[in-house]
Image: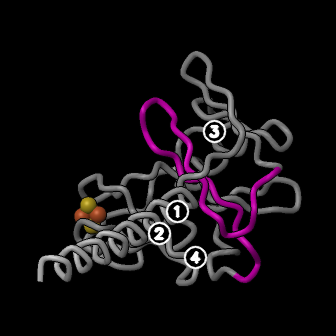
Amino acid sequence: MSDRRDFMGMALGAFAGLGALGALYAAKRTWDPLPSVKAGGFTTIDLSGAKENELNTEVWRGKPIFVMKVGKNNPAYNDKRLIKVGNDRFFIAIGLCTHLGCIPTYFPEKNKFICPCHGGQFDAAGKVLKAPPPKPLTIPPFKLEGTKMVLGEEGKEYKEMKAQKLV
Ligand code: FES
């Protein structure tokens, strides 16, 4: 009897271990950062290696920053909140839900973020698809330098978005 229990315990442990590995792998995929340099409150991210519809998470001034190259097949592709870099379009936002500050998870197969706390949803341009978040994900101040993005500085593109009340 005790052998059987040991076996069941080991089998369950192995199963739980595999589940945890799967979750870690999923989290890693979501949290893979792009090459970046941090200095004096600025974070410079190299966007050239970004893959379509794959979320990258950076850290800027202690906050998670979502960065994603949005593919043409994504329903948010034509949204004005996306930033044009060469021939590509990028979504960038502070990765904190505008309801109560939880970190939303991106589901690439659904092209949307879902907040684990109260079920709020955002599209791949950060716009609210489902309440309770009261407003879109916040776009941080940024400046473009070729295929590099400097977080913490208001560049021409950011100022234009500000004038259009997109940020
Ligand atoms: S904190 Fe995201 S829905 Fe409440």
Judging by the rendered image, the residue that carries numbered circle 4 is 108
Looking at the picture, how far across and down is residue 145, in whole percent? 81, 36
What is the C-alpha distance between the residues marked 1 and 4?
15 Å
Amino acid residing under circle 1: Tyr
- Of badges 2 and 4, nearer the viewer stands 2
Judging by the rendered image, the residue that carries numbered circle 1 is 25
Circles 1 and 2 in contact, beta carbons < 8 Å: yes
Q: Return the disc, 1 or 4, that comes first in the chain's sequence.
A: 1
From the viewer's perspective, tell me whether residue 23 is left or right of residue 142. left
Amino acid residing under circle 4: Pro
Q: Residue furthest left?
A: 1
What is the C-alpha distance between the residues marked 1 and 2?
5 Å
Amino acid residing under circle 2: Gly
Q: Is residue 41 above or below residue 84?
A: above
The magenta stretch spans which residues? 49-73
Q: Residue at x 57, y 76 (%)?
A: 108
The answer to whether residue 70 is magenta is yes
Ligand 1 picture quarter: bottom left
Q: Residue at x 62, y 25 (%)?
A: 38
Q: Return the disc, 3 or 4, that comes first in the chain's sequence.
A: 4
- The mark found on residue 22 in the picture is 2
**What crowding class fits label 2: few (fewer than 14 Cα within 10 Å), some (14-19), or many (20 or more)?**
few
**What crowding class fits label 3: few (fewer than 14 Cα within 10 Å), some (14-19), or many (20 or more)?**
many
Q: Return the disc, 1 or 3, that comes first in the chain's sequence.
A: 1
